[in-house]
Image (cartoon, grey):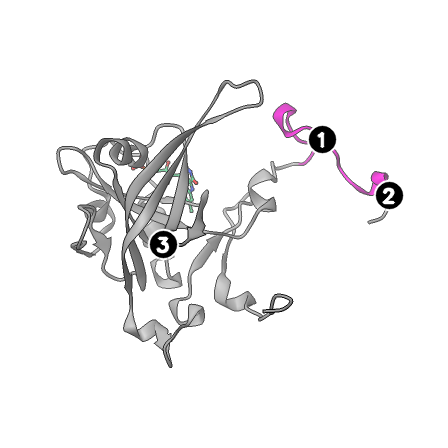
């Protein structure tokens, strides 16, 4: 790939030249934010978001983008809290069930048969079988804009970690072992591609570190 004619070049705002829109596959695989929230009336909610990432380490900030007004967004706005849960391979199918578009009154923990544990600092429960969960307090909800300054119809919810739960089984000689946690990664694709972070692990030290 060395000349311009070797590429499809296009403005994604105007469509794409492929059989399937690849935009969600380029920046991939992405970790999944399996977000637990509660509504103001205490109704529990659980939903996956792959527009999700770690933003800062100290203080630890993490965020997810809601494309459209999801119940998770509404709950984060109303209560200022969320709990992130890691999705290990064995929970991928259950996680997928919690992405069903259902009315706000539906508790997706119950819908998908997900066992929970109470959080310690915030109200949203955590997923009992997740090897890692992080309780967060919302710090910002950023309405995303297009280049004309118009609403992009998406909101980026950022929270600060206030309590971390990491399964002892994922810690080897004092080091957290991603291979033991085995998180599922989302990679777009026409048939909903997933991958495993642990499959592709290799080590590369930064210069001078
Ligand atoms: C793996 C996966 C990743 C998803 N990522 C996102 C995302 O990043 N943003 C989004 O708005 N919806 C995403 N969805 C869809 C939401 O999970 C879905 O709309 C869900 O119904 C939202 O639930 P809620 O209204 O209870 O918050 C994803 C679904 C799956 C299965």
Separation of marks 2 and 1 at Cα, in angstroms: 16 Å
Secondary structure of the residue carrying tag 1 is: loop
Separation of marks 2 and 3 at Cα, in angstroms: 42 Å
Residue 146, quarter of the rendered image: top right
Residue 177, quarter of the rendered image: bottom left
For disc 2, does the CB lie below 8 Å from ligand 1?
A: no
- Residue 63's spot in the image, x, y percent? 40, 43
Residue extending farthest bottom: 173
Label 1 Cα neighbours within 10 Å, binned few <14 / some 14-19 / many ≥20: few
The residue carrying mark 2 is: 3
Secondary structure of the residue carrying tag 2 is: loop
Separation of marks 1 and 3 at Cα, in angstroms: 35 Å
Q: How many numbered marks are there? A: 3
Which residues lie in the magenta part?
4-18
Label 2 Cα neighbours within 10 Å, binned few <14 / some 14-19 / many ≥20: few
> Could you say which disc has been placed on residue 10 in the image?
1
Examine the residues drawn in magenta and state their main secondary structure.
Answer: loop
Quarter of the figure that contains the C terminus: bottom right
> Could you say which disc has been placed on residue 29 in the image?
none
Nearer-N-terminus badge (2/3):
2
Label 3 Cα neighbours within 10 Å, binned few <14 / some 14-19 / many ≥20: few
């Amino acid at each position: 790939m060395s000349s311009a004619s070797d590429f499809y070049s296009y403005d994604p705002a105007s469509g794409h030249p492929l059989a399937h829109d690849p935009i969600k596959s380029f920046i991939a695989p992405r970790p999944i934010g399996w977000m637990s929230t509660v509504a103001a009336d205490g109704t529990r909610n659980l939903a996956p978001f792959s527009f999700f990432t770690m933003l800062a380490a100290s203080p630890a900030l993490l965020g997810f983008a809601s494309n459209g007004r999801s119940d998770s967004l509404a709950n984060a706005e109303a209560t200022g809290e969320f709990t992130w849960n890691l999705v290990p391979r064995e929970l991928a199918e259950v996680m997928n069930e919690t992405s069903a578009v259902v009315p706000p009154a539906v508790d997706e923990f119950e819908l998908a048969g997900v066992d929970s544990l109470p959080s310690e600092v915030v109200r949203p429960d955590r997923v009992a079988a997740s090897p890692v969960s992080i309780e967060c307090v919302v710090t910002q909800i950023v309405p995303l804009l297009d280049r004309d300054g118009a609403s992009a119809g998406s909101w980026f919810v950022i929270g600060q970690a206030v309590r971390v739960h990491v399964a002892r089984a994922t810690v080897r000689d004092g080091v957290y072992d991603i291979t033991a946690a085995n998180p599922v990664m989302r990679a777009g694709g026409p048939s909903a591609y997933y991958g495993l972070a642990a499959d592709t692990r290799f080590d590369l030290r930064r210069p001078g570190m």
